[in-house]
Amino acid sequence: MTVPAGRANSRDTLWPRLPKSRADTASVLETARHVTDDLADGLSGPRVRSAARGIRRLLAAEAAGLADLSGRLVLAGTVPSDIDLGTVVEKVLQTESRAGRGRVVALPLYVHDEMAGVLVACGGMKTAAVREVAGVIVAALERGHLEASAEHAAQAELRALRAEISPHFVYNALTVIAALVRPEPDRSRELMLDFADYIRYSLASHGEYTTVADEFHAIETYLALQRAVLGDRLRVQVRVAPEVLAVAVPYLVLQPVVENAIRHGIEPRTGGGLVLVTGEAEGADCVISVEDDGVGMDPELAASILAGNSPSGSMGLANVDRRLRNVYGPWFGLVVETAENDGTRVIVRVPRFQPGVMP
């Protein structure tokens, strides 16, 4: 797409021209970095005033400011009494093109070819310099927009995962609980409490992260309900080392893996089988394994499921794998070891300590 004259776009602007002195160059780069960080939350964020001060330093201007689409102008510096920057900003917003004359330059800021606000500077600097600084601002806004979009996508994926509670499982669990009310009231009451815990953990509002201890408690509750539904067809072993209980992990990363082991491994197998869940420390990592001796699957099918192409339409494993990689990087995520009629083992590996990851 061609960008009309007067639009600042990060793809065709340059960094500010740097002074010859290495000390001055380092200072300019440091200021530009601070401006970028200050604009992480956009032109309406809490650090816009700090960004305006940095922009004023970059341009050596009498005053510099940023306005969002509402026309709200955040200014750093002093403007001569004969200059009305508010009117200049309004003109840019209305015409979507450059405005100002003499000592004033005002440029529209475009993020992904959509107008996001206005940069205005006062002090007789060259328009080319203002354009170059505008490019730095647009790049910062685009980065913030992408990061916000990624966060919204992660939240949407988590909501989708919560919505994948199997109606079939819920119906079977409640049927078993109801059948035990008269012959085994204490057992029925225990299962009802387990069911309440399961629903609360799966659907209630949580932060983005929890602990291994909480995730293991949730899967033990789920497994207790599944044992009530499947009876002797389901055998379970859960072992977790104390040193990994406090490790922070993304919310709801284990239950979908355990549910997959039962639904697609044990339930289709004549006579049922065993689900083994372990958690232990391996050096700087926490390694959690969910293994079943069920029907297994073709390794190519497993790869397809991780890619989000599940024949059943469930996105549980793909969702967990994607969220792990987004949080910890491409070296992490799910590892699936399987073969037809030979069971399945899913390994979750996460760092025991990761900056920014805390419950």
Image (cartoon, helix red, strand yellow):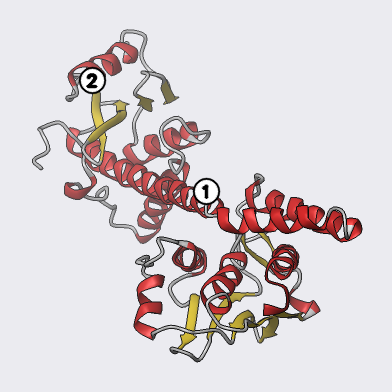
Q: Residue furthest top?
A: 82
Task: Name the kind of residue labelled 1 in the image.
Answer: Arg
Q: Is residue 234 visible?
A: no
User: Which quadrant: the N terminus?
Assistant: top left
Please tell me which residue is depicted at 62% across the width and 84% down the height of the picture: 271
Q: Percent x, y for residue 261?
A: 57, 75
- Circle 1: is it few (<14), some (14-19), or many (20+) Cα within 10 Å? some
Residue projecting furthest to the right: 186
Badge 1 vs badge 2, beta-carbon distance below 8 Å: no
Q: Quadrant of residue 349?
A: bottom right
Read off the residue under disc 1. 159
Q: Residue sitting at 53 percent across and 49 percent down?
A: 163
- Count the marks: how many? 2
First in sequence, mark 1 or 2: give its number. Answer: 2
Which numbered circle lies on residue 232?
A: none
Label 2 crowd bin: few (<14), some (14–19), many (20+), radius 10 Å: many
In the image: residue 127, left or right of residue 205:
left
> In front: 53, or 340?
340
| Residue under the image location 83 percent in, 57 percent down | 188
Q: Which residue is mark 2?
A: 92
